Image (tube, coloured by chain):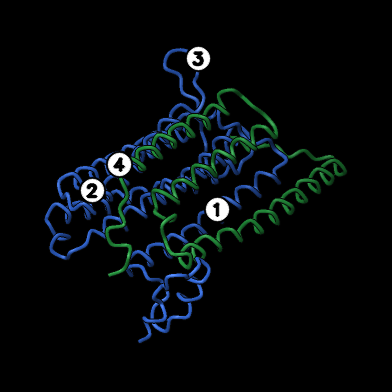
Amino acid sequence: MSATEGQQHPLGIYLWIWALLFVLSTLSYMVDYMNFQGYLRWTLILVFMFLKAGFIIAIFMHMAWERMALITAILLPPALLLFLIGLMALEGDYIFQIREFVYSVIEFTPISPHH
Amino acid sequence: MASDAAVTTADETRMGSVVNDWSADKQTFEVPWGKAMMWIFLLSDTFIFSSFLVGYMHVRIASTIPWPVPSEVFALSFGGDPIPLILIAIMTFILITSSGTMALAVNYGYRRNKKVTFWLMVATALLGASFVGMQAFEWTKLIVEEGVRPWSNPMGAPQFGSVFFMITGFHGMHVSAGVIYLLLIANRVRRGDYDKSGTYETVEIAGLYWHFVDLVWVFIFAFFYLW
C-alpha cells in the first residue's frame, strides 16, 4: 500500500491552520472596512489571498506531504497562468486607452444602459 | 518489475523522486488512483475558473464606464447604516468553517471513527448548503431590488451583472454539487463501506473537492468583492 495510507497528522495542526484562516479572512475584510485604496489595498488583498490559498492547499489539501512529482504536476500549470494574466492586463489597458482616445476624438461618451 | 523503478531510495532527493516517478513504466504517481484523478480534475477546474476571472479582469480594465463599487453594492443595513460586505464576510467564514470541519472529518476518517466522520461531513454539507442559500438571497436582492441584469445595471459598467452571475453561479453550482457529493459519501461512511473496503481514502478525496470549492471562493472574494 502506498505511503499515503494513514496520512494523518495530529488534529492540532488543522485547528491551528483553521484559526489562522479566520484571522487572515478577518484581515482581508478589514482592508475593505478600513477603506484602504490604491496600491496598499491591492497589495494587502493579494498577500492575504495567497496566504489563505497557500495554507488551504498545503495543509488542508495535504499538498505539503505529497510527492514532488504530484506537487509539480498540479502547481506548475496554474503558475503559468501568470503569463495569461499579465498579457490580458496589458491588452485590457490598451483597449481602455484606445477607447478613451477614440471617444474623445469622435465626441462620444458611452453611457450605461438603464432599465 | 516496473514498479521497482518507482521505489524511493534512501538517499533520493526530492527532485530525484520526480525523476524516479516519471521514469516508472507503469505508474507515475504513487498515490491512490482516485486521489490523482481528483487532483487532475481540480487542475482542469482551476483553468475554467481562471479563464472566467481573467475575462472579468480584462472587461473591468477595459471599461470606460466606472465599475460598480462592490462594498456599496453588497452592503446590508440592519436598521442602521449599511455595513459593507457583511453578508459576504459571513459567507466567507461559513466556507472556511466548512473546510475546517472537512479537514477534521478526513482526520477522523483515517482513525476509522465512523460516527464522528459522518457527523463532521454532515456539518460540512449543511454549512455549504447555507452558503448557497445566502448566495441565492444575494442574487434575489440584486435582481429584484437593484435591477441588475446580465446586460445592464443602474450602478455602472453594464458587464458587472454578467460577470457576477457567471462567476458566482458557477461557484454556487460547484458548492451545491459538493453538498450532494458529501452527503452521499457521508452515508457510505455511516454504513460502514470503508471499514469493509479497508480504507477511508474516499473521504480524503471528497475533502480535496471541498477544499477546492473554498479555494475558489478565496479568489472570488479577493478579486470580485474586495478589489
Q: Mark 4 points at which residue?
A: B101
Q: Label 3 vs label 1: CA separation?
A: 33 Å
Q: How crowded is mark 4: few (under 14 residues within 10 Å), some or many (20 or more)?
A: many
Toward which corner of the image does residue B209 lie, by quadrant? bottom left
First in sequence, mark 3 or 1: give its number.
1
A68, A79: nearer the viewer:
A68
Give the chain ID for the green colour.
A
Q: Name the residue under label 2.
A: B108
Residue at 50%, 67% (x, y): give it.
Answer: B13
Going by the numbered disc 2, the residue's amino acid type is: Tyr
Chain under disc 1: B
Toward which corner of the image does residue B222 lie, by quadrant? top right
Give the chain ID for the blue colour.
B
Q: Mark 3 points at which residue?
A: B81
Of discs 2 and 4, which sits in the foreground?
Answer: 2
Answer yes or no: are tags 4 and 3 on the same subunit.
Answer: yes
User: For the residue labelled by badge 2, is the local secondary structure a helix, a strand or a loop?
Assistant: helix
Going by the numbered disc 3, the residue's amino acid type is: Asp
Q: Label 2 vs label 4: CA separation?
A: 10 Å
